[in-house]
Image: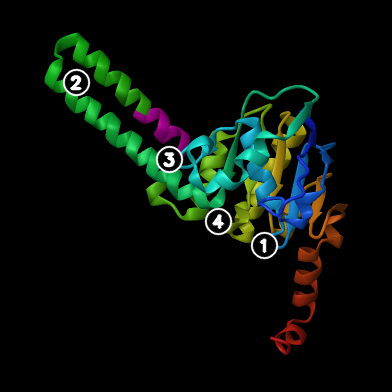
Amino acid sequence: MYYLRQIHLPIGSDRQFPFSLKSLKDLGSMSFDQPVTVFVGENGSGKSTLLKALAIKLNLPAIGSTDLESDETLDGVKNYGEQIITQWKDRAFRGFFFRAEDYFGFVKRLQNMDSEMQGDIVDFEKRLSGTGLKLAVGSILGQKEALLKKYGNLTEVSHGEGFLKVLEGRLQNEGIYLIDEPEAALSPQRQLALFSLIKNLAENHGCQFIIATHSPILMTLPNATIFQFGDKIEKVNYEDTEHFTVLKNFLNNPDAFLRHL
């Protein structure tokens, strides 16, 4: 089951960001008629901007070092996001927003949580004794063990391995998930692993995904709706995206491309 069905976007006549982006200036509305929606387009085309604004409107928790409300990098899109009007089939009450660049902030956040819990143990050992100490320390150790079971030790794995572990640990049934350029962290093999994870959750567990990506692999998710951002936003097949066309032509004849570089 998918949830968010349509969004109505603010229309601005000034040159202030993000209305300065051609793709967003007069967009008006956008419909989501499949469990997976993919935003594609060149850098600066507005796909990530719209994804961030939508995450703000939906008040999704962010996987990173801070929440969306406190994230100063989002100041330019907060007002835009708050003006978005949403229409739902059924409201999803779980989900998150995750940018590839926020992964290391999330690792740091987990490390800080671990340090704080270790500090609590030291504090308990100073103030408590007997059964009280045992219960208090046991509670903290249980939380530490739960985090380790959920994510593993993210400092001992590669960026791509850790990125997938975080997604596997956080994705749940019947949620809405906004993910921005996950391929930045992933090899082609890891992209296929993410492809499989998203496909299963979308088809069998009632999840909705909206993904901004440059990855031709993720663009081929079954039945995904693809919006290509440019001078305007248009719905396309993955074979008609600029990313797919450029990559296919390059791999078919790389020498032809190299001669023009």
Q: In the rendered structure, which segment of residues is drawn in magenta?
A: 144-151
- Asked if the residue at tag 3 contacts the one at tag 2, i.e. Cβ–Cβ closer than 8 Å, the answer is no
The residue identified by callout 2 is 124
Work out whether mark 2 precedes mark 4 in sequence or the reverse, and give the earlier one: 2
Instruction: Return the residue at label 1.
Output: 43
- Nearer to us of marks 2 and 3 is 2
Magenta segment main secondary structure: helix
Q: Name the residue under label 3.
A: 152
Q: Which amino acid does label 1 sit on?
A: Asn
Question: Which residue does the numbered mark 4 point to in the structure image?
Answer: 185
Residue at coordinates 74% horizontally, 36% vertically from top-left? 202
Whether the magenta-drawn stretch holds residue 129 is answered as: no
Other-residue count near label 1 (Cα within 10 Å), few / some / many at <14 / 14–19 / ≥20: few
Do labels 1 and 2 touch, CB within 8 Å? no
Q: Where is residue 251 in the image (x, y as percent from the top left)?
A: 75, 75
* Most foreground residue, 224 or 3: 3
